[in-house]
Amino acid sequence: MDAARTAGLTSRLRDAGLRATGPRIEILAALEILGGHRAAEEIHDLLTAQGERIPRSSVYNVLVSLADAGLVMRADAGPGAVRSTKRAAGGTTTSSAGSATGFSTSNASSASVRA
Protein backbone atom coordinates (compact mmCIF):
# COMPACT_ATOMS: atom_id res chain seq x y z
CA MET A 1 0.00 0.00 0.00
CA ASP A 2 1.39 3.41 -0.89
CA ALA A 3 2.21 6.06 1.70
CA ALA A 4 -0.55 8.47 0.64
CA ARG A 5 -3.22 5.78 0.94
CA THR A 6 -1.90 4.70 4.33
CA ALA A 7 -1.87 8.34 5.49
CA GLY A 8 -5.48 8.82 4.37
CA LEU A 9 -6.68 5.71 6.18
CA THR A 10 -4.66 6.65 9.26
CA SER A 11 -6.28 10.07 9.28
CA ARG A 12 -9.79 8.60 9.02
CA LEU A 13 -9.10 6.26 11.94
CA ARG A 14 -7.67 9.02 14.12
CA ASP A 15 -10.51 11.41 13.22
CA ALA A 16 -12.90 8.71 14.47
CA GLY A 17 -10.99 8.49 17.77
CA LEU A 18 -9.24 5.20 17.00
CA ARG A 19 -5.58 4.27 16.99
CA ALA A 20 -4.32 3.58 13.49
CA THR A 21 -3.23 -0.02 13.97
CA GLY A 22 -1.99 -2.22 11.15
CA PRO A 23 -5.06 -4.47 11.14
CA ARG A 24 -7.47 -1.50 11.09
CA ILE A 25 -5.62 0.11 8.18
CA GLU A 26 -5.44 -3.17 6.25
CA ILE A 27 -9.13 -3.97 6.77
CA LEU A 28 -10.25 -0.51 5.65
CA ALA A 29 -7.99 -0.84 2.59
CA ALA A 30 -9.40 -4.30 1.85
CA LEU A 31 -12.96 -2.93 1.90
CA GLU A 32 -11.92 -0.26 -0.60
CA ILE A 33 -10.37 -2.87 -2.89
CA LEU A 34 -13.27 -5.32 -2.66
CA GLY A 35 -16.11 -2.81 -2.86
CA GLY A 36 -19.74 -3.76 -2.27
CA HIS A 37 -21.06 -5.76 0.68
CA ARG A 38 -18.37 -8.12 1.90
CA ALA A 39 -18.23 -10.84 4.51
CA ALA A 40 -15.41 -10.87 7.06
CA GLU A 41 -14.30 -14.13 5.45
CA GLU A 42 -13.85 -12.37 2.10
CA ILE A 43 -11.82 -9.62 3.73
CA HIS A 44 -9.71 -12.23 5.53
CA ASP A 45 -9.18 -14.16 2.29
CA LEU A 46 -7.99 -11.02 0.47
CA LEU A 47 -5.61 -10.08 3.27
CA THR A 48 -4.24 -13.62 3.39
CA ALA A 49 -3.74 -13.60 -0.40
CA GLN A 50 -1.80 -10.34 0.02
CA GLY A 51 0.50 -12.03 2.53
CA GLU A 52 -1.00 -10.48 5.67
CA ARG A 53 -1.11 -12.71 8.72
CA ILE A 54 -4.23 -11.76 10.65
CA PRO A 55 -6.55 -14.17 12.46
CA ARG A 56 -10.11 -14.32 11.17
CA SER A 57 -11.35 -13.44 14.66
CA SER A 58 -9.31 -10.22 14.50
CA VAL A 59 -11.08 -9.26 11.27
CA TYR A 60 -14.43 -9.63 13.03
CA ASN A 61 -13.22 -7.68 16.08
CA VAL A 62 -11.80 -4.86 13.96
CA LEU A 63 -15.04 -4.60 11.95
CA VAL A 64 -17.00 -4.26 15.19
CA SER A 65 -14.67 -1.54 16.50
CA LEU A 66 -14.87 0.28 13.15
CA ALA A 67 -18.67 0.07 13.27
CA ASP A 68 -18.73 1.37 16.85
CA ALA A 69 -16.59 4.34 15.73
CA GLY A 70 -18.89 5.07 12.78
CA LEU A 71 -16.37 4.17 10.06
CA VAL A 72 -18.30 1.11 9.00
CA MET A 73 -21.91 0.19 9.45
CA ARG A 74 -23.74 -3.09 9.74
CA ALA A 75 -26.46 -4.03 7.28
CA ASP A 76 -28.88 -6.81 7.99
CA ALA A 77 -30.26 -8.35 4.83
CA GLY A 78 -31.41 -11.58 6.44
CA PRO A 79 -29.74 -14.73 7.67
CA GLY A 80 -26.18 -15.42 6.59
CA ALA A 81 -22.68 -14.07 6.92
CA VAL A 82 -22.02 -10.51 8.03
CA ARG A 83 -21.22 -8.38 4.98
CA SER A 84 -19.02 -5.28 4.77
CA THR A 85 -18.95 -2.48 2.24
CA LYS A 86 -17.66 1.05 1.81
CA ARG A 87 -19.62 4.19 2.56
CA ALA A 88 -19.88 7.13 0.16
CA ALA A 89 -18.55 10.58 0.94
CA GLY A 90 -20.96 12.78 2.83
CA GLY A 91 -22.43 9.86 4.72
CA THR A 92 -24.79 8.75 1.97
CA THR A 93 -25.59 5.08 1.91
CA THR A 94 -26.84 2.54 -0.52
CA SER A 95 -27.79 -1.04 0.06
CA SER A 96 -28.22 -4.17 -1.97
CA ALA A 97 -30.45 -7.16 -1.54
CA GLY A 98 -28.89 -10.31 -0.20
CA SER A 99 -29.06 -12.89 2.49
CA ALA A 100 -26.48 -11.46 4.84
CA THR A 101 -25.64 -8.79 7.38
CA GLY A 102 -22.90 -6.33 6.49
CA PHE A 103 -20.43 -3.62 7.36
CA SER A 104 -19.26 -0.67 5.27
CA THR A 105 -16.62 2.05 5.31
CA SER A 106 -16.59 5.66 4.17
CA ASN A 107 -14.16 7.01 1.58
CA ALA A 108 -14.31 10.39 -0.07
CA SER A 109 -12.72 9.08 -3.26
CA SER A 110 -15.20 6.37 -4.20
CA ALA A 111 -18.83 5.33 -3.92
CA SER A 112 -19.66 2.94 -1.15
CA VAL A 113 -22.29 1.28 1.00
CA ARG A 114 -22.64 1.65 4.71
CA ALA A 115 -24.09 -1.47 6.26
Image (spheres, rainbow, N blue to C red):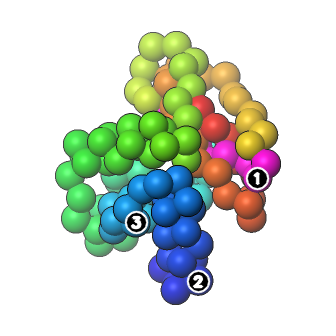
In the image, residue 38 sits, relative to residue 20, either above or below, namely above
- Which residue lies at the image location 30% right of the left edge and 42% below the top edge? 61
Expressed as whole percent of the image width and height from the top left, the position of residue 60 reads 32, 40
Q: CA distance from mark 2 to mark 3?
A: 14 Å
Q: Tell me the amino acid under the disc marked 1.
A: Ala
Residue at the disc numbered 1 = 89
Residue at the disc numbered 3 = 20
Find residue 49 and report its image quarter.
bottom left
Q: Tell me the amino acid under the disc marked 2.
A: Ala
Residue depth check, mark 3 versus mark 1: number of the one nearer the observer: 3
Q: Which residues are magenta?
A: 83-90
Mark 2 vs mark 3: which is more N-terminal?
A: 2
Q: Secondary structure at mark 2?
A: helix
Nearer to the camera, 31 or 91: 91
Can residue 39 be seen here? The reply is: no
Q: Secondary structure at mark 1?
A: helix
Expressed as whole percent of the image width and height from the top left, the position of residue 58 reads 25, 48
Q: Are marks 3 and 1 in contact (CB under 8 Å)?
A: no
- Which residue lies at the image location 74% right of the left edge and 64% below the top edge? 109
- Which residue lies at the image location 64% right of the left edge and 38% below the top edge? 114
Q: Secondary structure at mark 3?
A: loop
Q: CA distance from mark 2 to mark 1?
A: 18 Å
In the image, residue 96 sits, relative to residue 40, either above or below, namely above
Can residue 59 be seen here? The reply is: yes
Please give left or right for residue 107 compared with residue 103 in the image.
right
Expressed as whole percent of the image width and height from the top left, the position of residue 11 reads 55, 69
Q: Which mark identifies residue 4?
A: 2
Q: Which mark identifies residue 102?
A: none
Please give left or right for residue 29 compared with residue 64 in the image.
right
